[in-house]
Image: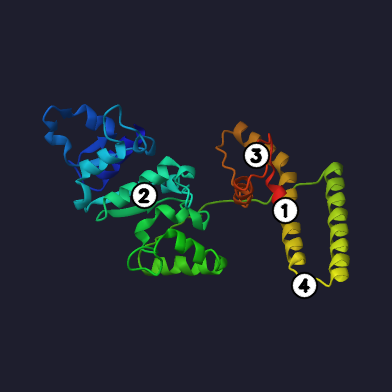
């Protein structure tokens, strides 16, 4: 409800007075008479949540997605479809419709059934990995007129090219006018670096880990020499080594972060804690492969 009021305010601020903002499909239901929808609700801005979008629509009724398509005018609709916080639709599993979320499938369905609609994808975290792009069909990266027949072909090719190619892809989208990225200003922002001292127990854990990884490296070196192997095992070793110690260092900081946050709340401040490189993607891959199924606790450090 509050978001709908915000939409009313924003339209008014833009000078678009008199444009009706319809509060979801529920309001459409309430204004539907025996002879159809009342005149005042046939045009305007239909504002709804993703929870409403995936709704079934009730017994004997169309799905909410179909109701929205009908209200817009079906295939002939050439208005604007704005998907705010569109990362809600990013969990689409290639080749596994049952494993995809209802939201991702409904967002793709809307774009398919309204091929002339102008689509705006708006999010601060729209894509965290390449597979999250599946719902962004209007970017023109796959489909008719592009080098790739579908998203699966696009994903299979591009995922092999690494981070550099993804950066080039972002630059190309920006050049074509399909991608706009903005950041918040840091004017008047302040920051400080807090040094976290290690406890004797943490120092012991770190030293034990160092000895363990050193021994693993020694044994791997001996094994490579004995087998005359030319595999990439040492490359994998150093990659796992880096991930392990990164997460170990992060874990050492948790207690201090909690203390700082509690003190800030006592001082009347609002707390935002940012987490980067959490290992969530790696953990999800292992879970999809059946690793750790049914476990009460699973650490992403095991990806090492």
First-in-chain label (2 vs 3): 2
**Residue occupying image coordinates x 25% and y 48%:** 14
Question: Badges 4 and 2: C-beta atoms under 8 Å apart?
Answer: no
Which secondary structure, mark 3? loop
Question: Badges 2 and 1: C-beta atoms under 8 Å apart?
Answer: no
Residue 95 showing in the rendered view: yes
How far is the residue under mark 1 from the one under mark 4? 21 Å
> What numbered label is drawn on residue 108?
2
> What numbered label is drawn on residue 304?
1
First-in-chain label (2 vs 1): 2
**Residue occupying image coordinates x 85% and y 69%:** 227
First-in-chain label (1 vs 4): 4
* 266 lies left or right of 86: right
Which secondary structure, mark 1? loop
Question: Badges 2 and 3: C-beta atoms under 8 Å apart?
Answer: no
Question: Badges 1 and 3: C-beta atoms under 8 Å apart?
Answer: no
Number of dots carrying numbers: 4
First-in-chain label (3 vs 4): 4
10 Å neighbourhood of mark 4: few (<14), some, or many (≥20)? Answer: few
> What numbered label is drawn on residue 144?
none
Question: Badges 3 and 4: C-beta atoms under 8 Å apart?
Answer: no
The residue beneath circle 4 is: 230
């Amino acid at each position: 409800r509050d978001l709908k009021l915000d939409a009313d305010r924003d339209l008014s601020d833009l000078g678009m007075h008199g444009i009706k903002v319809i509060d979801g499909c529920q309001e459409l239901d309430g204004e539907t008479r025996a002879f159809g929808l009342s005149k005042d609700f046939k045009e305007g801005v239909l504002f709804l949540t993703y929870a409403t979008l995936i709704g079934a629509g009730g017994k004997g009724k169309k799905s909410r997605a179909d109701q929205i398509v009908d209200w817009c005018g079906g295939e002939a609709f050439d208005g604007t479809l704005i998907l705010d916080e569109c990362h809600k639709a990013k969990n689409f599993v290639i080749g596994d419709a049952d494993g995809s979320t209802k939201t991702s499938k409904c967002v793709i369905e809307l774009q398919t059934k309204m091929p002339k609609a102008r689509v705006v994808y708006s999010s601060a975290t729209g894509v965290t990995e390449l597979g999250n792009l599946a719902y962004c069909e209007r970017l023109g990266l796959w489909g008719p007129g592009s080098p790739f027949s579908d998203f699966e072909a696009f994903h299979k090719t591009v995922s092999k090219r690494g981070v550099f190619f993804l950066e080039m892809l972002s630059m190309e989208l920006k050049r074509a006018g399909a991608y706009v990225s903005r950041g918040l200003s840091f004017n008047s922002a302040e920051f400080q670096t807090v040094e976290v001292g290690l406890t004797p127990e943490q120092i012991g854990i770190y030293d034990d880990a160092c000895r363990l990884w050193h021994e693993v490296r020694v044994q791997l070196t001996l094994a490579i020499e004995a087998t005359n192997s030319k595999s990439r095992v040492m490359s994998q070793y150093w990659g796992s080594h880096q991930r392990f110690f990164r997460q170990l260092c992060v874990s050492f900081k948790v207690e201090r972060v909690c203390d700082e946050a509690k003190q800030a709340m006592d001082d009347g401040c609002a707390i935002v804690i940012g987490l980067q490189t959490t290992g969530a993607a790696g953990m999800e891959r292992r879970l999809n492969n059946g690793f750790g199924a049914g476990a009460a606790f699973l650490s992403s450090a095991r990806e090492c």
